[in-house]
């Protein structure tokens, strides 16, 4: 600047706060002075003085917290090419265009190429706002009027703006059909008509505009339509039709959309197979086909290396999911295939993806064991595998590997939980030779614990003290048993069928074979907690005879329990 045209009275810090702005009429204001987005002015209304900036070409006061009427003097900035007064902050009173209205506000701004007034309350009918813009802004390229209280129908006069490339009119209540003349904007790159209460059938010609990069029609629940054939030179990057009545099948030519990065078809009426041609969409980042009627198998997405989200839930998809479909998806964060009829086993490649945070495969027909690789996904937050046919055993210690897990659902499967506590072997410290004199006495004491340890574990307080296994109970977190009356004959018979507990603990082993019996026997000896602690299944037999107990001991032998041969009597 040759002379100062503005005095900013405030210290310049990380987030500069302008207490007030004083403009004078001297000097020339450089165009870059208009770049003031997201500043904290500590003002409730746009200050006076902007009318003096007659040389300004770019003015951006977006998200600055201003409210109230937009000043009349803005129309004096006749050289403006870009004007952005948008506000996206919830809870802040909006700017208004009431007096002057939109027509008066734009009367001298004929050089404008970009007009962004998102959330400003204009409150104009379709013919009024369309005519005001088309008659005064002949060079307009970008029109963004989201949530401006506009009403419909959209007037054909808008077609006079032949150069329009960006049209963003979302969150206005048009309550009308979409005019087909949008297909005549030859340079159209972005069309956002989401949440506009549109109805009728959407013109397919608009989707086929070769320059169109973004089409967002979401949240128009009365809007019908279908997808056309896509030409090889299509430019579409973002296609969002969620919460509409779009229906029909996806054309194979969807594979021609080589630049497609986002496709959202949530809660529509699409049916038929997902085309295999989608396997060639290498730029795909976000895919959501949930809540439709898609059938057939899932195509491969292994070439879409940038995919972060795949949601195919609530469809009628069938078949297996081959391992090759998921290889290389290093960026995948969310995978939701729930509520389909998929079957087979889960491929290991699916659980080897390092970025996965959410895996939802519930309500399918998957079978077999859950791959152990899933328990190595340190970043996993949600794992839902409920209502399938998974079988096998899950170790609690493996689940403990999940450091960030917030939701785990394995219900309605054929899984068992192995709660066995794995105790690491300890290295014995060298002993003084003087201790050897006590060896015989210690061995006798240990032998007594060896033969009677487990009998006491299912007895009352007296037997616990008699056989000295209080330490055993404490080792495994068992609560005090309540049974105080254990008959000698039963305990002695039990001792004959039971092997080591105390010695097993010494060797880092857990051996509770004979502690499994029928429901009556468990209640009688108070060992329900023991069974639950170690994941033993309940036996149907209520009366365990000696032969059955011995058979159990054989089944839960040294190989099963980890006991060493010399420990088993």
Image (cartoon, grey):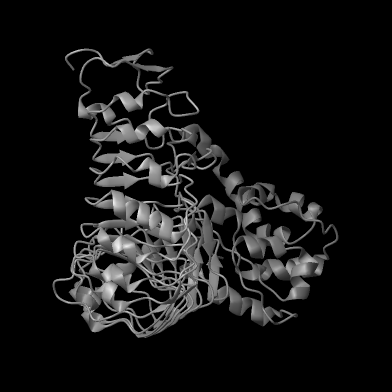
Q: For this rendering, which residue is in front, 386 or 110?
A: 110
Q: Locate residue 181: give its quadrant.
A: bottom left
Quarter the N terminus occupies: top left
Q: For this rendering, which residue is in front, 172 or 339?
A: 172
Residue 296 visible here: no
Image coords of residue 564 (percent x, y):
47, 61
Q: For this rendering, which residue is in front, 545 or 86?
A: 86
Query: Quick check: 563 above or below 19?
Result: below
Query: Quick check: 230 above or below 53?
Result: below
Which residue lies at the image location 29% right of the left edge and 68% below the top edge? 182
Q: For this rendering, which residue is in front, 113 or 452?
A: 113
Which residue lies at the image location 40% right of the left edge and 64% below the top edge? 154
Which residue lies at the image location 30% right of the left edge and 55% below the top edge? 134
546 lies left or right of 511: right
Q: Locate residue 131: give its quadrant.
A: bottom left
260 lies left or right of 71: left
Image coords of residue 510 (percent x, y):
55, 59
Residue 57 visible here: yes
Query: Quick check: 168 above or below 154?
Result: above
Q: Furthest-right residue in view? A: 485
Image coords of residue 512 (percent x, y):
61, 65
Image coords of residue 430 (percent x, y):
42, 36
Count of marks overlaid on the render: 0
Quarter the C terminus occupies: bottom right
Query: Quick check: 8 above or below 399?
Result: above
């Amino acid at each position: 600047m040759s002379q100062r045209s503005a005095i900013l009275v405030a210290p310049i810090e990380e987030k500069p706060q302008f207490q007030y702005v004083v403009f004078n009429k001297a000097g020339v204001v450089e165009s870059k002075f208009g770049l003031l987005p997201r500043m904290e002015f500590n003002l409730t209304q746009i200050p006076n003085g902007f009318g003096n900036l007659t040389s300004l070409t770019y003015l951006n006061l977006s998200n600055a917290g201003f409210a109230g009427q937009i000043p009349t003097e803005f129309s004096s900035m006749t050289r403006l090419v870009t004007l952005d007064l948008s506000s996206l902050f919830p809870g802040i009173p909006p700017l208004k265009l009431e007096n002057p209205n939109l027509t008066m506000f734009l009367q001298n701004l004929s050089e404008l190429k970009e007009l962004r007034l998102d959330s400003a309350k204009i409150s104009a009918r379709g013919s009024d706002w369309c005519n005001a813009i088309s008659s005064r802004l002949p060079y307009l390229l970008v029109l963004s009027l989201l949530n401006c209280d506009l009403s419909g129908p959209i007037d054909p006069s808008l077609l006079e703006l032949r150069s329009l490339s960006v049209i963003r009119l979302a969150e206005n209540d048009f309550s009308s059909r979409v005019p087909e003349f949008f297909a005549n904007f030859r340079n159209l790159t972005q069309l956002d008509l989401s949440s506009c209460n549109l109805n009728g059938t959407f013109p397919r010609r608009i989707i086929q505009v070769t320059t169109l990069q973004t089409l967002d029609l979401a949240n128009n629940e009365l809007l019908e339509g279908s997808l056309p054939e896509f030409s090889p030179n299509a430019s579409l990057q973002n296609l969002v039709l969620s919460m509409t009545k779009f229906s029909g099948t996806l054309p194979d030519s969807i594979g021609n959309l080589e630049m497609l990065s986002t496709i959202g078809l949530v809660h529509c009426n699409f049916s038929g197979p997902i085309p295999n041609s989608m396997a060639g969409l290498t730029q795909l980042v976000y895919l959501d086909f949930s809540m439709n009627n898609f059938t057939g198998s899932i195509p491969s997405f292994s070439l879409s290396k940038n995919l972060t989200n795949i949601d195919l839930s609530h469809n009628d998809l069938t078949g297996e999911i081959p391992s090759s479909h998921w290889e290389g998806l290093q960026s995948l964060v969310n995978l939701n295939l729930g509520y389909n009829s998929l079957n087979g086993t889960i491929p290991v490649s699916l659980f080897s993806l390092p970025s996965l945070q959410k895996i939802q495969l519930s309500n399918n027909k998957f079978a077999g064991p859950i791959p152990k690789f899933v328990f190595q996904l340190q970043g996993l937050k949600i794992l839902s595998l409920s209502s399938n046919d998974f079988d096998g055993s899950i170790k609690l210690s493996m689940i403990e590997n999940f450091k960030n897990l917030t939701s785990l659902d394995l219900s309605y499967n054929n899984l068992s939980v192995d709660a066995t506590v794995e105790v690491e072997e300890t290295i014995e410290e060298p002993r003084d030779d003087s201790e050897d004199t006590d060896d015989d006495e210690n061995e006798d004491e240990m032998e007594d614990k060896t033969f009677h340890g487990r009998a006491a574990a299912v007895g009352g307080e007296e037997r616990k003290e008699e056989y000295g296994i209080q330490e055993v109970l404490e080792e495994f977190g068992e609560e005090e048993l309540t049974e105080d009356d254990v008959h000698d004959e039963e305990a002695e018979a039990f001792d004959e069928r039971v092997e080591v507990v105390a010695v097993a603990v010494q060797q880092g082993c857990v051996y509770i074979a004979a502690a499994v019996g029928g429901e009556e026997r468990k209640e009688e000896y108070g060992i329900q907690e023991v069974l639950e602690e170690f994941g033993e299944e309940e036996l149907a037999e209520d009366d365990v005879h000696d032969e059955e107990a011995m058979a159990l001991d054989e089944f839960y032998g040294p190989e099963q329990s980890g006991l060493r041969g010399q420990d088993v009597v």
